[in-house]
Image (cartoon, grey):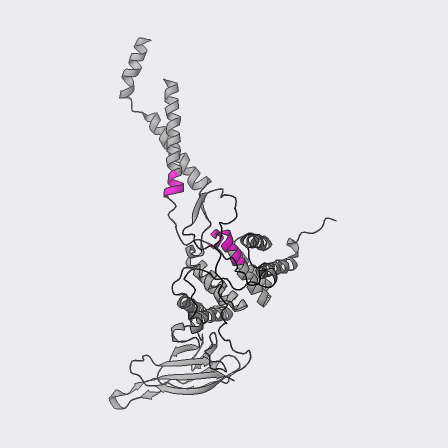
Amino acid sequence: MRLRRLIWFVVMIGIGAAAGIFYGWVLRPTQTSDFALNTLRSDYKADFVLMTAEIYQKDGDLTAAISRLAALEETPPLRKVQQAILTGQQLGYARSDIETLAALFQGLQKGLPSLTPTAEP
Amino acid sequence: MIEDEYYEEDEAPRQPPLYLLTGLVIGLLLGLLISLVIAPVQVVDTSPFLLGEEEKDAYRLLIARAFQADQNLERARARLGLLRDNAAPQTLADQALRMQSNGGSEADIRALAELAAALSSPQSAASTQPAGLPTAPPGGEGENAGTPQTFPTLDLNQAVQTATPPPTPTSPPPTPRPTFTPRLLPTPLPTLGAPFDLVEQNAICETAQTPPRLMIEVQDSSGNPVPGIAITVAWDGGIETFYTGLMPSLGAGYADFDMQAGVVYSLRVGELSETINDLQAPACGEGEAAFTGSLRLLFRQR
């Protein structure tokens, strides 16, 4: 009898947990807009970085470019540009756009020496 | 033994099943802990039109600055299409006005005004680009020359919500290949450094025009309207700067300013032009029908 009670007790815990998870993951998230930039899909993020690169190519202002990239998400700017280049290649971006991104990448490498991988002594 | 079974089966219905309720409550708390604290829902893979207003403003500004850099109107239009804004030029102009009133960067305001004006120009309207579908500019040199360029997918209607940890990023779904559309010529921009001259000054005496306005049109040397030109108006006790192109419906080179009757204004278009002094709202009509009219000034680049 005790074993039967224990089994039912565990079953009820499972049912309760399922209900709690259903509430937290399905019912409660009612937000359908007003999202932040870091929630954008990777191809939109890549286009965001491309826009930044286009502006950088024109004005050469690395500080402004870094600031724009920082608005996108918290990852280091070099990584964001790297990721954008990869995404751009996957999506078949025009060569000129990849070059624009590459120019920003190079600018960041020069401007952010601490983030540039260096050879082991 | 028989008695035990008898008692258990006999007594069970009379006891409230508290252990079941306790299990349910414990499970519920556990489930809430998991779904709200340990692994809450994280939103990923959203589209630009789902962004918050501030983020949309930042996105729009970036589009405008990118347009200013590459003068690719079709690309800017496609990017604005991602925000699903039916009145993009007006939204850009509104944002520029908001930034102006909040003391925003002059370069940013100018970029927004230029893009608003470029989108409103008749040349831009001639494009048969379907709403929301981006059209790529012609490809670059070499192997990509003349080939359509891929752009971010536009068909995502809602955000995907996942529990922590979010799924490993995978390659985006296939992107529709846009059709090739010839790149439009950008809106004419003024020659850098060339000043603007006042070529026309008219008093506008229309009773419906209240309050009196200083209506300014700025054109390049060919007579094309020029957006994004800073106009500084000063009077005894005040100074204000505003930009052409923030009211696309009235023209890309148009800007206006509310005047006060009896106040004398000085005005300068751009940075190198001469300052026009002694501007006043004109007196119109006579006797009881007298009212203060507006002033229209036309500037053209040398």
- How far across and how far down the image is residue A69, in percent? 54, 58
Can you see residue A14?
Answer: yes
- How far across and how far down the image is residue B154, in percent? 44, 55
Residue lying farthest to the bottom in this orientation: B286
Judged left or right of residue A117, residue B258 is: left
The residue lying at 39 percent from left, 34 percent from top is A18
- How far across and how far down the image is residue B88, in percent? 41, 65
Task: Please determine whether, in this image, residue A97 is positioned above or below residue A15.
Answer: below
Asked where in the image residue B216 lies, by quadrant, the reply is bottom left
Can you see residue B259?
Answer: no
Q: Give the range drawn in magenta.
A: A22-49
Judged left or right of residue B147, residue B29 is: left
A31 or B172, which is in the foreground?
A: B172
Task: Please determine whether, in this image, residue B245 is positioned above or below residue A54.
Answer: below
**Is residue A42 within the magenta segment?**
yes
Asked where in the image residue A57 lies, by quadrant, the reply is bottom right
A83 or B231, which is in the foreground?
A: A83
How many numbered callouts?
Answer: 0
**Is residue B292 within the magenta segment?**
no
Image quarter where the N terminus of chain B lies is top left
The residue lying at 39 percent from left, 51 percent from top is A32
Residue lying farthest to the left in this orientation: B288
Q: Kindly report the secondary structure that dominates the magenta region of the rendered protein.
A: helix
- How far across and how far down the image is residue B156, in percent? 43, 52
